[in-house]
Image (cartoon, rainbow, N blue to C red):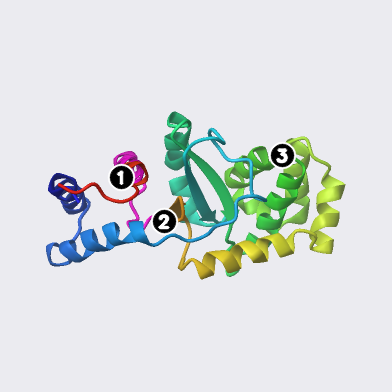
Amino acid sequence: RHAPRMARLAVRLLRAGAKKEELAATVERYYASFDKRAKLDVSRFGPPLGDAAAPIAAVEFSDFTCPFCQRVRPGLEAFVKERASRVNLFYKPFPIESHPGALEAAQAGEWARAHDLFWPMHDALFDAPHAATSVDALADLARGVGGDPADLRGALEEKRFLKAVRESQAEARGAGIRGTPTLFLNGRMLVLSDYSDEGLEETLADEEEWLRNRGWEHD
């Protein structure tokens, strides 16, 4: 590992309010994460935001009704769009079922994915999170993105997409996530909850170097 890279990370963490006595352990945990890769299935959870051929796949486990997901979303999506040739973004559902309507919203998202309407529906669900608590409101969102509201109603009643949501939740738990949103870059969990543009750029550049050298380039 390059000392300057580690020093930059330490300075950034201190600026963000990290405790000095925990700094060394936090930096070590970040670099150790590069050797821990979860196998995440994205074959049924496309299309991604960004270029599908980008060398780094970011997988976000998220909940349409999660307030923190709401806050992270604009910056994360803007980051990916600005770097579409370097990284893409797959959304996978991890509804927090204590949130009213979270499971229904997740199923509505998977219904939209099956009808090639995922990203418009994704945006609509995030823009109107309270719609998750009403089947009528979800049906209106489906109509608004060009889908069949009656078909969405049927899908929710029959729980047609519940299995896909449950499989995504199980995969996420197996990968060690504890809350939403959680981001993985080529299977590596983003262990620092820093979704700032600077933080994401630093970890993306680190991932690119790790990928390029098949590990860390030593001094």
Residue at image point 27% right, 57% down = 31
Foreground residue among 190 and 154: 190
In this rendering, position of residue 166 left or right of residue 189: right
- Residue type indicated by callout 2: Arg
- Please identify the quarter of the rendering in which residue 145 is found: top right
Q: Disc number at residue 117?
A: 3
Q: Disc number at residue 123?
A: none
The CA distance from mark 3 to mark 2 is: 28 Å
Residue at image point 74% right, 36% down = 144
Q: Earlier in the sequence, mark 3 or mark 2?
A: 3
In this rendering, position of residue 65 left or right of residue 30: right
In this rendering, position of residue 100 left or right of residue 136: left
Mark 1 Cα within 10 Å, few/some/many (few <14, many 20+)?
some
> Could you say where residue 168 lies in the image, as x and y percent from the top left?
61, 61
Residue at image point 58% right, 46% down = 126
Query: Considering the numbered disc 1 on the image, is that residue within a helix, a strand or a loop?
Result: helix
> Could you say where residue 15 lies in the image, as x and y percent from the top left?
18, 49
Foreground residue among 43 and 170: 43
Foreground residue among 121 and 89: 89
Q: Which residue is mark 2?
A: 188
- Residue type indicated by callout 3: Leu
Q: Disc number at residue 206?
A: 1
In the image, residue 131 above or below residue 168: above
User: What predominant SS class does the magenta segment belong to?
Assistant: helix
The stretch in magenta equals: 189-208
Query: Considering the numbered disc 3 on the image, is that residue within a helix, a strand or a loop?
Result: loop
